[in-house]
Structures are given as C-alpha cells and as structure tokens.
Image: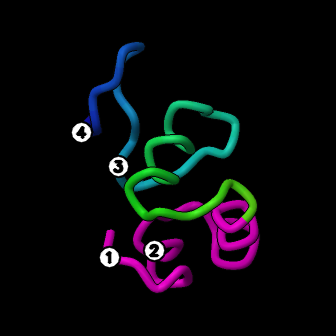
Amino acid sequence: MAGLKDKRGFIDKDRLDLTERQAVEYWMKRWGVTRDQITAAHRKVGRMTKDIAAELGKKR
C-alpha cells in the first residue's frame, strides 16, 4: 500500500478515514484547515483526498 509514513505505519494518501487521528492531523496541517472543515468536506464529497482538497480549495 502506498502511503505517507508516520510513527505507527502508513497513512493512505488517496483516501481519508476520519477515524484515523494521525491521518486527519496530517491533512489538517498540510492543508491549514480545521478538523471541522475536513469533516464537512468529507461528508460532502466522500473520502478521496483529491476530492476533499478540491472542496477545500487546496492542492492535494
């Protein structure tokens, strides 16, 4: 599985699982957004990071 390495293992770079705290924190920092903004975008467009980024007006 391709992904981003963190202390516990790998974070999937294509899909965002809101139950994965490390992944959510990574994308919050990367995109400069809040958890609520990520959650709202995730609910609106689904779990694909490219779609969430587009919804937030950010580059993946």
Q: CA distance from mark 1 to mark 2?
A: 6 Å
Give coordinates of residue 53: x percent, y percent: 45, 74
**Quadrant showing the C terminus:** bottom left
Dot 2 falls on a residue whose secondary structure is helix
Of the residues under marks 4 and 1, which one precedes in the sequence?
4
Instruction: Tell me which amino acid carries mark 3.
Output: Lys
Q: In the image, which residues are magenta?
A: 37-60
Instruction: Tell me which amino acid carries mark 4.
Output: Ala
Q: What residue is shown at x 58% (from left), y 61% (from top)?
A: 47
When the figure is inspected, residue 58 is found, relative to residue 32, above or below; the finding is below
Dot 3 falls on a residue whose secondary structure is loop
Residue 35 colored magenta?
no
The label shown at residue 2 is 4
Q: Which residue is mark 3?
A: 13
Q: Is residue 44 left or right of residue 27?
A: right
Give coordinates of residue 43: x percent, y percent: 75, 68
**Quadrant showing the N terminus:** top left
Q: Nearer the viewer, mark 1 or mark 3?
A: 1
Q: Which residue is mark 1?
A: 59
Instruction: Tell me which amino acid carries mark 2.
Output: Ala
Q: Which residue is more in the foreground, 11 or 34?
A: 34
